[in-house]
Image (cartoon, rainbow, N blue to C red):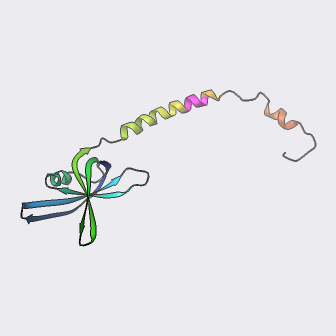
Amino acid sequence: MEIVGKVVRLGNLTEGTSARGAWRKQELIIETLEQYPKQVCLVCWGDRVAEAQNFIPGQTIKAQISVESREFNGKWYTDVRPFRFDIEAPQQNQSFQQTIQQPVQNQQFAQQYEQPVNNIPVTEYFETDNGDDLPF
């Protein structure tokens, strides 16, 4: 799975030692780029911690993720773990091209409808009076 979003902030950095050795865990909070944005906490382990610490708030990233749930004492806990990060290019180029093309499209639209729809002069239309003041 993949998720794309803007970096909101870095969360807690946790370090410890287990039977397997030293470990590090860093939380990275991103906001999705949907119509209704959602904030998602990515839990980075090991080498991903160093990558997560290089991101700055507002930067758009794409993360390949795995979603894992586990049960402990009758409660379920879910982690969203990234295993690959990509920095997304800003979308400014696309919106810039749309801004340039929009006046051209508006100009073409205006030229298409520049000719009058009917040839009745406005004064002639209002000068005719049939004695009825009703608008319909």
Q: Position of residue 16 (x, y in %)?
A: 10, 65
What residue is drawn where x is 14% and y is 52%?
Answer: 47
Pinpoint residue 95: horizontal percent, then vertical percent: 41, 39
The x and y percentages for residue 114 are: 65, 28
Horizontal side, residue 107 vs residue 45: left or right: right
The quadrant in which the C terminus is found is: top right
**In which image quadrant can residue 125 be found?**
top right
Please tell me whether residue 48 is drawn above or below residue 113 in the rendered image: below
What secondary structure do most residues of the magenta stretch adopt?
Answer: helix
**Residue 109 is covered by the magenta coloring:** yes
The verdict on residue 15 being magenta is: no
107 vs 46, left or right, is: right
Horizontal relation, residue 103 to residue 33: left or right: right
Q: Please report the residue visible at 92 percent of the width from the left and 40 percent of the height from the top.
A: 130
Q: What residue occupies the far right of the structure in this picture?
A: 131
Residue stretch in magenta: 106-110
Image position of 86 (left or right of 37): left
The residue lying toward the viewer, choosing from 69 and 60, is 69
Q: Residue at x 16, y 55 (%)?
A: 49
